Amino acid sequence: MGARWRGLAWGAVLLLAGGLCGCSGGQPKPAAPAAAVSVSPLDRTVAFLPQYEHEPPENGGTFTMALPVDPVTLNPILASDRVSYMAYKWIFDPLIDMDADMKPVGVLAQSWENSPDNRTTTFHLRKGVLWQDGKPFTADDVLFSYRAAMDPAVDAVQLRPAFDQVAKVEKVDDYTVRVTWKEPYAPGLAAWVFYIIPEHVYGYAKGKGASFNQSPANQAPVGTGPFRLEEWKRGDRLVLTANDQYWRGRPHLDRLILKVIPKGQTQLAAYETGQLDMAGLSSEQWDQLRTDPAFAAGASIFEYYARQFFYLGWNMDGSNPFFADRRVRQAMTYALNRQGVVDSILGGHGAVAAGPFYPMSWSSDPRVKPYPYDPAKAAALLDEAGWKLPPGKTIREKDGKPFSFECLVPAEVDMFSRWLEVFQQDLKRVGVDMRIRKAEWSVFLDRTHRHQFQAYLSGWGLGDDPDPYPLLDSSQARILPSGMAVGQNDCSYVNPEVDRLIGEEERTFDLKARQTFFWQIQRLVAEDQPMTFLFWPTQMVAVKNRFQDVRVSRAGYGMFTWYPSLLDWWVPKELQKP
């Protein structure tokens, strides 16, 4: 499952403001001179200084990373923004998590198994785990966390859809929890990347869920996680210290500082002056720094594909005369020079997308390739669809109506408008007029979720399971009495065979068989082109090289959104700062 960005959260801000918006202009760059960095950042998966690669880890040291703003809350049940996640994830533990290869691993759950009919999942919890106030963790905390998330009075609307297929959650004993599903549901396990909170700290009386939203513990958390909150100086920093009682053993680092770097200040400047130990790099910054021996000597540099893609969505609900015809949608994709945008605007830091499945994952069919840039093919398809170019005119027409449409874009993301300006010229070359309409973010979301658009540009962030139901199943295009769509199929895509295959993959627990369904879905979607899949961007990150065993996930989880990630980082004693 995944989600359209419903706010310019930390991940999108880092990517768009830090990673992309500093990129070069519309002209391709000359080839860069030879790099001072010896290992290609896109090839690097782990970083050690050579003299420490085979040494045992040592405890001590502080790692400082940036947040763009303060967290909204440190309660994982309430948090819906990326900034809050990047703070609370070190203080609390989930029941399970994903490792660097996108495989589930036990955290508070030591193990789990499904019943033969796949209608129940039984989690066996770790014994001896302590909350940071010394109280024991038990199944009661899991049930309380689930019930709080499902309480309509609790502000946890972002969590509840993940549990739609849960019929009930029961305590079997103090260290066993059984989940009963409404029907066998393969994506369901990913819902339990679910952070658990202590009932004895956050508990509330029945019918008093609103009080949970205002709990003092939301700002002074008690978790089971590897770090505990020591200090929160708003507008400046959060200081987390190692939890010596952590069930896995304390993290090697003594402290984790989350420093607020407000808009207008760059991470790179803070990194270079020693305020930060990590910084996101734009392509322009990388081009300037890649040949700098001093920079390379002190940094481990990584580049990785994010688990998010950009797309142009075409409204197929019949409200416009253009995009219900598959040939027209295919023509749109052939007409757009997506590789040119990757090369010129993204500085080469990205890849043209072939579909909605992460290209480095088991769910993506490697035989499905992106449509090439082919204006002649686009023109032929438009001719076939009846959109002809009248003599002496520059815009195609059909039944006397010109092919002129509006593309909606969020005004806050300047980079989107830059891409559209390039695409606008691409379409003009094949006789299509695209007008760019900027809208404030809330208006953009409202209009797209009401299907009040002809085309729009947005992004989609992938969840822990590749199930495409929210984006592609026709049921998710239905409009509610409120006027809003029930799901996020805002293009009104309808293909009964895709619906059937989604249903099959959701009921299939064998990975190879499920992969077959995903690959069939991808091939059908590639033919239908309900949206033009633009590109998968990469992110570039520099980390001070005094930190050892720094790893990046090639499954798209980057530096931190997998387990155990930071918990294995360490700093040699002689490199630790006082």
Image (spheres, helix red, strand yellow):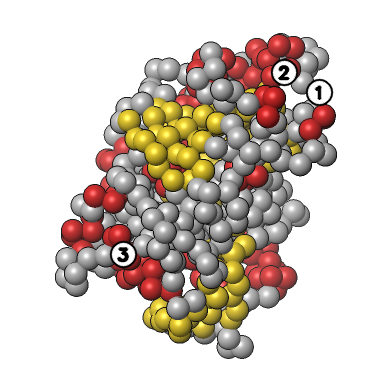
Instruction: Return the residue at label 2.
Output: 296
Q: Percent x, y for residue 335?
A: 59, 36
Q: Earlier in the sequence, mark 1 or mark 2?
A: 1
User: Disc 3 marks which amino acid?
Assistant: His
| Label 1 with label 2: CB-CB less than 8 Å | yes
What label does residue 200 carry, if any?
3
Dot 1: few (<14), some (14–19), or many (≥20) neighbours within 10 Å? few
Q: Which of 57 and 16 is in front in this view?
A: 57
Label 1's element? loop
Label 2's element? helix
Say left or right for 359 vs 466: right
Q: Please, is residue 457 above or below residue 160 in the view? A: above
User: Disc 2 marks which amino acid?
Assistant: Ala
Q: Which of marks 2 and 3 is nearer the N terminus?
A: 3
Residue furthest bottom as drawn: 117
Q: Percent x, y for residue 374?
A: 67, 37
Q: Distance between the residues labelled 2 and 3?
A: 49 Å
| Label 2 with label 3: CB-CB less than 8 Å | no
User: Which residue does the image show at 44% across and 66% down from the upper left?
Assistant: 137
